[in-house]
Every structure is written in C-alpha cells, then in structure tokens.
Amino acid sequence: MYTIKHAAQRVGITTATLRAWERRYGVIAPHRSESGYRLYGDHDVAVLRSMKQLVDEGWSAGLAAAEAIRLARTQPSPEIAAEARGDGAGPSPGFAERLTTAAAALDTTGLAANLDQVFALGGFETVMTDHVFPALEKLGDAWADGRVSVAGEHLASNAVMRRLALAYEAAAAHGHGPRIALGTAPDTRHEIGLLAFAVAARRHGMDTDYLGADLPIDDWLGVIDDPGLAAAVLAIPTTADIAASAAVITALHDHRPDLVVAVGGAQQSHAPEPAVRLGDDIAAGARTLADAISQKQR
C-alpha cells in the first residue's frame, strides 16, 4: 500500500491532481488506515496511470476517467500487474504470448483485453516501443511458422491499427508545429509502424497529414508541391519494399531539395542519401525529425 504522496509519485502526477481525480471522477476508492490516512494499492496506481496516459494523449479528464475505469474491469493478469508496478524490464514476453495465442484462436475479445491492459502500462511511445512492436514481431514469426493463420495475423494487426487510429485522433490537439506528410511507397502495405510514428510526431507538436499505404510516386510529388510542407516521412518495413521506397525518396529529393525526407522501418538502413533515418524508438525518432526540420529552416 502507498501513501498519497508515494502513489502520486508512482503515477507521475501531483497529490493535488490525484485528490481532484478521486473526488471529481471517482476513478479510484482508496482504503483508509486506522489513523484515517488514504492508502493506495497497486490496482489504484495502475488505474491512475491509465488515466494519466489518456490525458497526456489529449483526452478530457472526464472521458479519460471513464475509460480508465472501463479498462480496470478487464482484470489484469499477474504479469500485467507486475509490469504496472515496474517489476519488469524491457519487452513483455507474457504480452507477446497472449497476443499470439488470441490471434491463433481468432479471439477478438482476448485481443481487445490484452491491448487494453498493455496500453495501461505507461505512455504511448514507451508501450509501443517496449511492448507492442516486439509482440508484433513475435506474431509475425508465429505466422511464418504456421502457428497463426493469415486471418489471425490480420485480426491482431487490425486490432492494433484501430488503437493507433484512436490515439492519432486523440493527439490532434498537440499538432500545431511544422507540417509533415506520412505515407508509404507503391505496393508497401505494412503501416503499423508508420501510424505509430505519426501519433508520436503529433504528440511532439507536429502537424501531420497521414496519407497511408501504397501511394504512387506522382501522388507523392503532388503532395510535396505544397510549399508549407516541411517534411515527408516514409516507412520501409520489409526487404520487398526497399526498391520502391528508394525510388520515391530519390524523386522527392530531386523535386524539392529543400524538403526533409525521413524514413523509418526495419529496412531503413537501405534508404538512399540524404534521407534522415529515424531509428527504432518512435519518441527519439520524433525528436530527430524535429531537429532535422529545424536545421533545414535555419
């Protein structure tokens, strides 16, 4: 059990904010010691962290409280509870196994519950980088060796995409900085990483136009004709996407040498110069992109 001061520190909010959320929204109901002091358990801390994450993503406090209470009803497993307490370090093998199992069983409810639980662990960028991306890589391995069907892989991937779409809309209030366009090259259809980066970029203050997958080169050139556009961001997720992505990146640079062209994804090292490589951490990548835009605009 934690005092109000220690609980607030674990969540990352002030004691005044904790009291206000408790009083106004009934998000938690702490115990009382024999002396009348509030005492908070691990479950209370996890619920408050979930609410804080949503507020940080742009949700109103009232809606965030209602969603945090709903998520709490999913009864997190012991592994999730340990992660919420900070007992674990790095990627969560338990989450990866649960996601793969639910995908193999075509278990929509199980997928939703596990995604609810993992997104309650912390901030968006940390959850994606430390938990969701590694779990999706394991899911891909399970599909490749036949443990998960194409239908199961699509079911899980689309469940994640829906969460990212919600996070993208929730982050809209953050994006008032330099304008960027995000999409993939022709015939490049894997876009989970790109959409996750779009969320991180919005949360970092950028104004984003998310164009999605499989964009023809002529369309890309039409998009960057807008002089107000500061950067174009592509993803190269697989080796099959390298050639088409390189062609788009070269065309963009030749058409507008003043434009920042940045690239992420597993095969980003194959991007031609002068593309800016964003790395594997979406939060750090957003900072890298912002720095590159700032340098170009000087």
Image: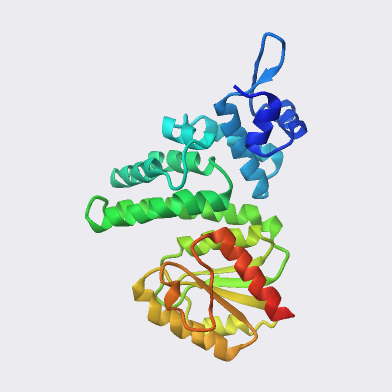
Identity of the residue furthest to the right in this view: 16
Front residue of 280 and 176: 280
State the residue at coordinates (55%, 27%): 43
Residue at the extreme top of the image, as rendered: 34
Q: Which residue is situated farthest in the left direction here?
A: 146
Q: Residue at x 28, y 53 (%)?
A: 142
Q: Is residue 128 left or right of residue 22?
A: left
Q: Is residue 185 above or below residue 254?
A: above
Give the image location of residue 94, x and y in percent: 38, 40
Q: Percent x, y for residue 197?
A: 55, 62
Quarter that holds the N terminus: top right
Quarter of the image with the C terminus in it: bottom right
Depth check: give the residue in front, 249 or 160: 249
Q: Residue at x 50, y 52 (%)?
A: 128
- Say which residue appears at 56% left-offset and 43% top-offset: 122
Q: Quadrant of residue 22?
A: top right
Q: Is residue 179 above or below residue 42?
A: below
Residue 82 image point, x, y percent = 47, 33
Q: Nearer the viewer, residue 55 or 89?
A: 89
Quadrant housing residue 290? bottom right
